[in-house]
Image: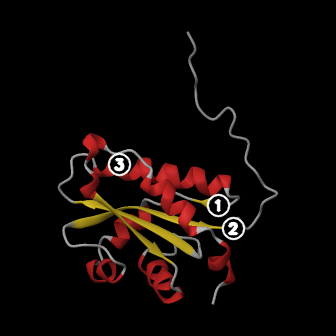
C-alpha cells in the first residue's frame, strides 16, 4: 500500500470539487472519479503515456458529451481542487494530453467509474511534490494592464 495515499486528505479535495460553481446550476453534467488503487493508477499511466507523473491520487473529472458548459465547469472544478491542494501543501497538475489518450479507452473509463454518455475532460494527478525547494517565480508571467 502506498502510504502517500493515506496521508492525502482526500475529503477536503472532494469538498473543494463539490463547492465549485457550475453554469446555470446544471449539476448533472459533471462527475468525479477519485482514483487511488495502485492497479488502476498504473492502467491510467499506461493508457496516457505516463502523463500523470505516477501520482498516488488522480481526480478524473468527466462531463456529459452533449453539455454546453461541461468543459468550462470541469476547468473551474479543477481549479478549486488545485487551490485546495496547494493550500494543503500538495502538488497537482491540470492534464489535457492524457485526457485525449484516455478517451480512447472507454472500457477503462467505465472501470474507473465513468458513466455512459460522459467523457473525461480533466485529469488531476495529486501528490506530494518531489522537489519542494524549487519554486518557480510566477509573479510576472502574464501581461497585466491597469487603467
Q: Which mark is residue 128?
A: 2
Q: Are marks 2 and 3 in contact (CB under 8 Å)?
A: no
Mark 1 element type: strand
Mark 3 element type: helix
Q: Position of residue 128 (x, y in %)?
A: 69, 67
Q: Residue at x 35, y 65 (%)?
A: 100
Q: Are marks 1 and 2 in contact (CB under 8 Å)?
A: yes
Mark 2 element type: loop
In the rendered image, the quadrant that contains the N terminus is bottom right
Please give the residue where the numbered disc 3 appears in the rendered image.
73
Q: Is residue 53 left or right of residue 137?
A: left
Cα gap from disc 1 to disc 2, whole angstroms: 5 Å
Based on the displayed image, in which of its 4 quarters is residue 114 positioned? bottom left
Q: Which mark is residue 14?
A: none
Cα gap from disc 1 to disc 3, whole angstroms: 21 Å
In the rendered image, the quadrant that contains the C terminus is top right
Residue farthest right in this picture: 133
Residue 8 in the image: above or below residue 142 = below
Mark sitting earlier along the chain (1/2): 1
Q: Residue at x 63, y 35 (%)?
A: 141
Please give the residue where the numbered disc 1 appears in the rendered image.
91
Amino acid at each position: 500500500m502506498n502510504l502517500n495515499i493515506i496521508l492525502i486528505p482526500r475529503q477536503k479535495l472532494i469538498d473543494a470539487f463539490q463547492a465549485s460553481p457550475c453554469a446555470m446550476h446544471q449539476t448533472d453534467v459533471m462527475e468525479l472519479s477519485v482514483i487511488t488503487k495502485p492497479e488502476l493508477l498504473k492502467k491510467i499511466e499506461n493508457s496516457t503515456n505516463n502523463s500523470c507523473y505516477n501520482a498516488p491520487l488522480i481526480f478524473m473529472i468527466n462531463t456529459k458529451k452533449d453539455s454546453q458548459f461541461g468543459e468550462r465547469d470541469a476547468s473551474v472544478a479543477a481549479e478549486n481542487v488545485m487551490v485546495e491542494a496547494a493550500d494543503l501543501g500538495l502538488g497537482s497538475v491540470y492534464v489535457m494530453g492524457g485526457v485525449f489518450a484516455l478517451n480512447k479507452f472507454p472500457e477503462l473509463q467505465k472501470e474507473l467509474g465513468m458513466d455512459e454518455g460522459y467523457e473525461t475532460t480533466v485529469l488531476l494527478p495529486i501528490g506530494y511534490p518531489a522537489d519542494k525547494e524549487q519554486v518557480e517565480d510566477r509573479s510576472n508571467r502574464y501581461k497585466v494592464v491597469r487603467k
